[in-house]
Image (cartoon, rainbow, N blue to C red):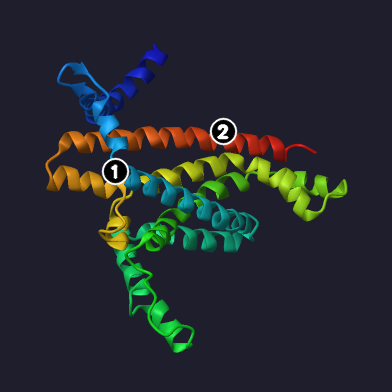
Amino acid sequence: MRNKSVYLLLLPGLIVITLFLLVPLFSTVAMTFQGERGFSLARYADFFGDEFYLRIYLRTLRLSLIATGIAVLAGFPTAYYISKARQNLKGVYTILAVFPLLTSPVVRSFSWMVVLGKYGLVNKALLGLKLIDEPLKLLYNEFAIVIGFVNLFLPLMIMSLIGVMENIDHDLVEAAESLGASKFRSFLKVVFPLSIPGLIVGSILVFTGSFTAYTTPQLLGGNKSKVLATLIYQNAMTLSDWNGAAVIATVMILTTLLVSAAINRCTARLQGKAGLS
């Protein structure tokens, strides 16, 4: 009876998820496989056969992977430093790391427009230092989109890694050093492999968020640097091409699943190699 009551408690949540998430999702995906004569992959062939769509798809994938790589390189040492900080400072550092999440993506994007604009803070500083003769084009391009992605999702990487690193037993590091390993080698052979689960979660969160983001690329990328999310909006709201928008959405879902699986596989291999003596 007790087990049955537990399952009954799950029932309302399952009903809500099924009705408002799974049913619309499967309906959208099923729509893309419907042709004039039944099942058809023609819409996907048209998507990947169109140079315009393919270029936007590859751009979105490339920018998301770049943002994920930068987040790993910046987030790993930051998370390690915070996890090893004194208890009274750890809370302050954590709040500073999470603080960007407390502001809207729209506000952060507009802030970067002020910083990266033609007469923004960066160009004014470079002009004042006589390092450049004319303002650099730092806005409305792929560079600005990557900056926005990293700023938007880096806190997720840091928090994912902190949660794992705090649970690493420091005695393991001391044991490795007592056996003759240097600090760098003990970090590489002990801390890094044990941090892999947080690295996987953080990488998937950053990539998925970047690959599906709309506001940041729309504001910072402009019309010349479209991504799949802005393309969906254009197809659905401007062109009223709901079938085309559904195809793009399905491609995004499948891509995030495939890349997430690839990240899991790559990090598992890294964990295995790092664990070797």
Q: Is label 1 in a helix, a strand or a loop?
A: helix
The residue located at (83%, 49%) in the rendering is 181
Q: Residues within 10 Å of mark 1 (few under 14, many from 20)?
A: some
Image position, residue 90 (x, y; %): 57, 59
Left or right placement of residue 186 versus residue 267 in this view: right
The residue beneath circle 1 is: 53
How far across and how far down the image is residue 116, in percent?
A: 37, 72
Name which residue type carries label 1: Tyr
Q: Residue at x 26, y 50 (%)?
A: 230
Residue picked out by circle 2: 265
Residue closest to the eye, 203 or 229 = 229
Left or right: 266 in relation to 97: right
Distance of mark 2 from mark 1, alpha carbons? 28 Å
SS for callout 2:
helix
> Which numbered circle lies on residue 31?
none
**Residue drawn at x 41%, y 15% as measured from the top left:** 3
Residue 277: give x, y in percent of width and height: 80, 39
Q: Residue at x 29, y 53 (%)?
A: 226
Whether residue 132 is situated above or below residue 100 in the rendered picture: below
Quadrant showing the N terminus = top left
Residue 31 seen anywhere in this rendered image of the structure: yes
**Dividing the picture into quarters, in which one does residue 212 lie?**
top left
Q: Is residue 159 left or right of residue 30?
A: right
Residue type marked 2 = Arg
Say whether disc 2 or disc 1 marks the residue closer to the N-terminus: 1
